[in-house]
Amino acid sequence: MAVLDQQMMARALQLAARGLYTTEPNPRVGCVLVRDGQIVGEGWHVRAGQGHAEVNALAQAGAQARGATAYVTLEPCSHFGKTPPCADALVKAGVSRVVAAMQDPNPQVAGRGLERLRAAGIAVTCGVLEAEAKALNPGFIKRMRSGLPWVRLKLAMSLDGRTAMASGESQWITGPAARADVQRLRARSGAVISGADSVLLDDSALNVRAAELDLPEDQARAAAERQPLRVLIDGRLRVPLTRRLFQTPGPTLVVCYQASNRQAEYQAAGSELLALPGQDQHVDLAALLAELAGRGCNEVLVESGAHLAGAFWRAQLVDELVIYMAPRLLGSQARGLLELPFAHMAEAMDVEITDLRAVGRDWRITARPVFPS
């Protein structure tokens, strides 16, 4: 049974991953129904407001769901949201056993779904491929537990650790495969954050473009339909409203450090203006992340220059670092990766590399920060 449980949960995780770009603010969840060793129903959560994975799998299985085992990557919900509780749907369908990869971190569920199933006489197992299930939803888990999103800091650099020429010119350090990979990082995020300096230099729109995702056409189209919230940190409101960021369709939030009388001007441009005062005439980055979590953002991608990237790092607000390293040299006059004004070796900070792989002609390094406790 243990081998079958792992095989079926692996399949459920594959299904859950199909919602990687579309389920925000909900978690990615997959479900497989098995009866007499055969799969009789499969489903995954596609997007918020639509059927959950269990409901979709039950619909496919029909009467064959009675007596079946349900493999679910996340504990079935027990509360009414936009859809009825999935735990009740499983009970009504007559499944005999439920195998969950992990307990739901949502305080509204947090074990109640599993208890409801047990109370109905259904055998329950929890913890099968739990690590893999958690890796699929880092942002949802963190937001439910801490009230903050998962922050992914993306940077691109040359082999000698430079991100742009002294003039600020940076297009393009990396190749098309790496840029498509960044598009996919944007697509899975609830919000993309950049700073005024970067937008002024690159005139980036910070949007998801279906043609550049390098995904099957239907997946690319679905991913681009759900544009992330584009967040511009512009403390002194220096970026003109004529820039591509404001001319490209999609929600935009501009964050400054003090209240402004330009609210109507930004609203007319289709953007929201928010003041989050911090210290030394800077935006309060922690307050910004709490604000984004409150808006349902599970994962946040920071795409910025060395100054803002360094600010997030120094504030210990980064959960994951993604660096694209190109096989080229930009020279000693080019700009550095992060603004971290260390003077002594004792100040150096470690990272834990979790993944290293080729992306086209470039290399992608994924790492977790090791912040001092």
Image (cartoon, grey):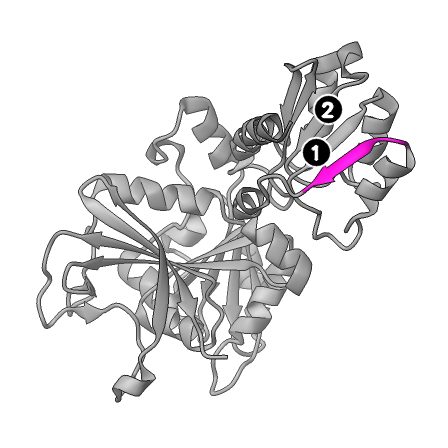
Residue pointed to by mark 2: 69
Q: Is residue 294 above or below residue 84?
A: below
Q: Decide if residue 138 is in sight here.
A: yes
Amino acid at dot 1 = Val
> Quick one: 264 or 213, which is closer to the camera?
213
> Quick one: 98 or 300, which is closer to the camera?
98
Residue 117, quarter of the rendered image: top right
Residue pointed to by mark 1: 99
Q: What stretch is highlighted in magenta?
A: 121-126
Q: Is residue 290 left or right of residue 76?
A: left
Q: In this view, does 360 lie to the left or right of 213?
A: left
**Residue at horizontal 49 percent and vertical 69 percent from the top:** 317
Q: Are marks 2 and 1 in contact (CB under 8 Å)?
A: yes
Q: Is residue 16 above or below residue 184?
A: above
- Magenta-drawn stretch, dominant element (helix, strand or loop): strand
**Residue at horizontal 49 percent and vertical 35 percent from the top:** 223
**Residue at horizontal 43 percent and vertical 47 percent from the top:** 186
Task: Give the CA separation, mark 2 to mark 1.
Answer: 7 Å
Amino acid at dot 2 = Thr
Q: Is residue 125 magenta?
A: yes
Q: In this view, does 124 lie above or below 234?
A: above
Q: Position of residue 191 (x, y in %)?
A: 51, 53
Which disc is residue 36 wearing? none
Q: Which of marks 2 and 1 is nearer the N terminus?
A: 2
Residue 158, quarter of the rendered image: bottom left
